[in-house]
Image: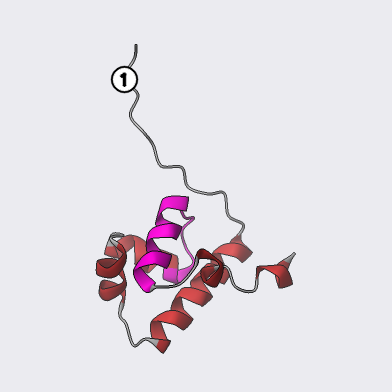
Amino acid sequence: MENKKSEQKVLPLSPLIRKLISFNLERIRLKRDLNITQIAELSGVDRSVVSRYVSGNRGMTLENLLRLSKGLGVTPNDLLDGWEKIF
């Protein structure tokens, strides 16, 4: 039996969804007066990755979506708030 390394797959998010998550992360960050480093520490997601999520320049793994929402004390739906206006 071959030992296969588990790989995290980046969700194929459209640029609009990436911007939506970016907007919601920034909204939550400002409301709670957090910086990128604090979000990274709360969520366990690397600081550079969080920075790219906040800027909307990176797709996201489902695991990181869940880590961010848990670390920020919000639901994944809160990070996707407004999706129904896009589709």
Relative to 15, residue 24 above or below: below
State the image quarter where residue 40 is shown: bottom left
- Classify mark 1: residues with Cα within 10 Å, few (<14), some (14-19) or many (20+): few
Q: Is residue 55 magenta?
A: yes
x and y, in percent, of residue 74 in the image:
45, 72
Relative to 1, residue 10 above or below: below
Q: Is residue 60 magenta?
A: yes
Range of residues picked out in magenta: 54-72
Residue sitting at 35 percent across and 60 percent down?
49
Residue sitting at 37 percent across and 60 percent down?
67
x and y, in percent, of residue 9 in the image:
46, 42
SS under mark 1: loop
x and y, in percent, of residue 16 in the image:
63, 65
Please give left or right for residue 34 compared with residue 13 in the image.
left
On-image quarter of the C terminus: bottom right
Residue sitting at 34 percent across and 88 percent down?
33
Relative to 19, residue 8 above or below: above
Can residue 61 be seen by looking at this rendering? Answer: no
Name, please, the residue furthest toward the top: 1
**Magenta segment, prevailing SS (helix, strand or loop):** helix
Please give left or right for residue 57 compared with residue 84 in the image.
left
Can residue 72 be seen by looking at this rendering? Answer: yes
Residue sitting at 37 percent across and 86 percent down?
32
State the image quarter where residue 3 is shown: top left
Q: Which residue is mark 1?
A: 3
Residue placed most toward the observer, 74 or 53: 74
Mark 1: amino acid: Asn
